[in-house]
Amino acid sequence: MSKQILILPGDGIGPEIMAEAVKVLTLANSKYSLGFELSHDVIGGAPSTSTACRWPTRPWTRARAADAVLLGAVGGPKWDKIERDIRPERGLLKIRAQLGLFGNLRPAILYPQLADASSLKPEVVAGLDILIVRELTGGIYFGAPRGVRELENGERQAYDTLPYSESEIRRIARVGFDMARVRGKKVCSVDKANVLASSQLWREIVEEVAKDYPDVELSHMYVDNAAMQLVRAPKQFDVIVTDNLFGDILSDQASMLTGSIGMLPSASLDTNNKGMYEPCHGSAPDIAGQGIANPLATILSVSMMLRYSFNLADAADAIEKAVSLVLDQGLRTGDIWSQGCTKVGTQEMGDAVVAALRNL
Ligand code: NAD
């Protein structure tokens, strides 16, 4: 039976980068006889022509039925002033929660060809290969109550809630340890246990889970120190496991170690490894429509999809090899460009990856 992949380009640069990723996926599908059937739908603010952006239910239903989902990005200034609960980003949080996609894998790998594009010294980042495992369906982004209330003195007070249950912590910790087992066998759990009750429970449960993984070394780090260590000595990390909020911030920070957020793919997995795959970046409204966005994060998200949801390591390796070959050729979008390289647009970069994959 064919495997169904739902393509959701979204807003801003979403459709531009997705067009290139779909070209690569389509070629891989035929070249390696993968048996994928692709279908498309709209998501984000895109379905709406006005600011009355309502989150349609159709993509949810279709995403649930699909074997995997490939997403571009959602959101943009057009929807920034509307009520928070109907913003595109809220819809994305809901879809992740509804699909039970609690395990977010965000690899930060520095391609050696891009050592110059990193804002850190080459010797600090050369050979960098970190995996950030972020809890995606709990914590402060979902916690209730939340809102704005009026205090007795008439002043408004905004509040959010950061809840984590033992089972939520345990299952994401297991993902971190499982990943570390097939990598460098080190887990650093990042929290703020010196201040937050949720982090104290987090640390306790991670230590419990660690007992099942005696072959994996566990360390703990406060999030403020982790932010500092990521730019001081990032190669000390193998797998970082952390909560939703800290993971969101640290993975964006880690992206700059690799040169550009335009290089970072991600996977969001449920308990059966059904997943949604998307670049770590957003809809980049500042460059949308110009044909200059880097499509490699989305193309590398295709490779993660083949690896994690379909166990197709050879095809995934081939896509990553094709990306590496294109970087060897000196082709760069503006975000990763450096002196001596050839600046290309979104489409040329996608075409180059397709050509490299075809020739493998
Ligand atoms: P962003 O990631 O969209 O952009 C940050 C910076 O990185 C911008 O300068 C942008 O031009 C650049 N950039 C991002 N992707 C790039 C690419 N592929 N190639 C080259 N440069 C790239 O973050 P932001 O500006 O904070 O957010 C813009 C919108 O995206 C907001 O509405 C935000 O809510 C939304 N957003 C969506 C997602 C998602 O869909 N998963 C994630 C983050 C932000």
Image (cartoon, rainbow, N blue to C red):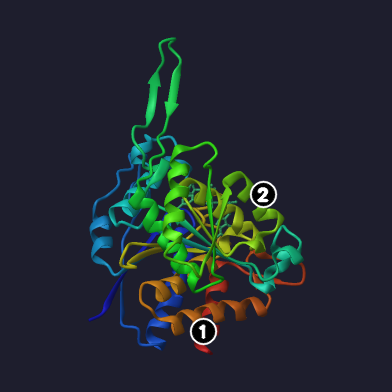
In the displayed structure, 207 sits above or below 348; it is above
The residue labelled by disc 2 is 228
Which of labels 1 and 2 is toward the front?
2
Q: CA distance from mark 1 to mark 2?
A: 38 Å
- In the displayed structure image, the side of residue 106 where residue 110 appears, left or right: right
First-in-chain label (1 vs 2): 2
Residue 317 badge: none
Q: Residue furthest bottom?
A: 359
The residue labelled by disc 1 is 357
Q: Dividing the image into 4 quarters, which one contains the N terminus? A: bottom left
Q: Residues within 10 Å of mark 1 (few under 14, many from 20)?
A: many
Q: Amino acid at mark 2?
A: Met
Q: Quadrant of residue 127?
A: bottom right
- Residue 345 spot, x, y in % from top left: 59, 67
- Residue 161 spot, x, y in % from top left: 40, 35
- Residue 235 spot, x, y in % from top left: 66, 64
- Residue 305 spot, x, y in % from top left: 41, 71
**Residues at marks 1 and 2 touching, judged by CB atoms closer than 8 Å:** no
Q: Residues within 10 Å of mark 2 (few under 14, many from 20)?
A: few
Q: Residue furthest top?
A: 153
Helix or strand or loop: what does disc 2 sit on? helix
Helix or strand or loop: what does disc 1 sit on? helix
Q: Quadrant of residue 313?
A: bottom left
Which residue does the image show at 38% across and 40% down from the upper left? Answer: 163
Q: Quadrant of residue 70?
A: bottom left
Q: Amino acid at mark 1?
A: Leu
In the displayed structure, 49 sits above or below 273; it is above
Which residue does the image show at 32% across and 53% down from the upper left? Answer: 95
Q: Is residue 104 visible?
A: no
Which residue does the image show at 38% across and 82% down from the upper left? Answer: 29
* Front-most of residues 291 and 178: 178
In the displayed structure, 99 sits above or below 113; it is above
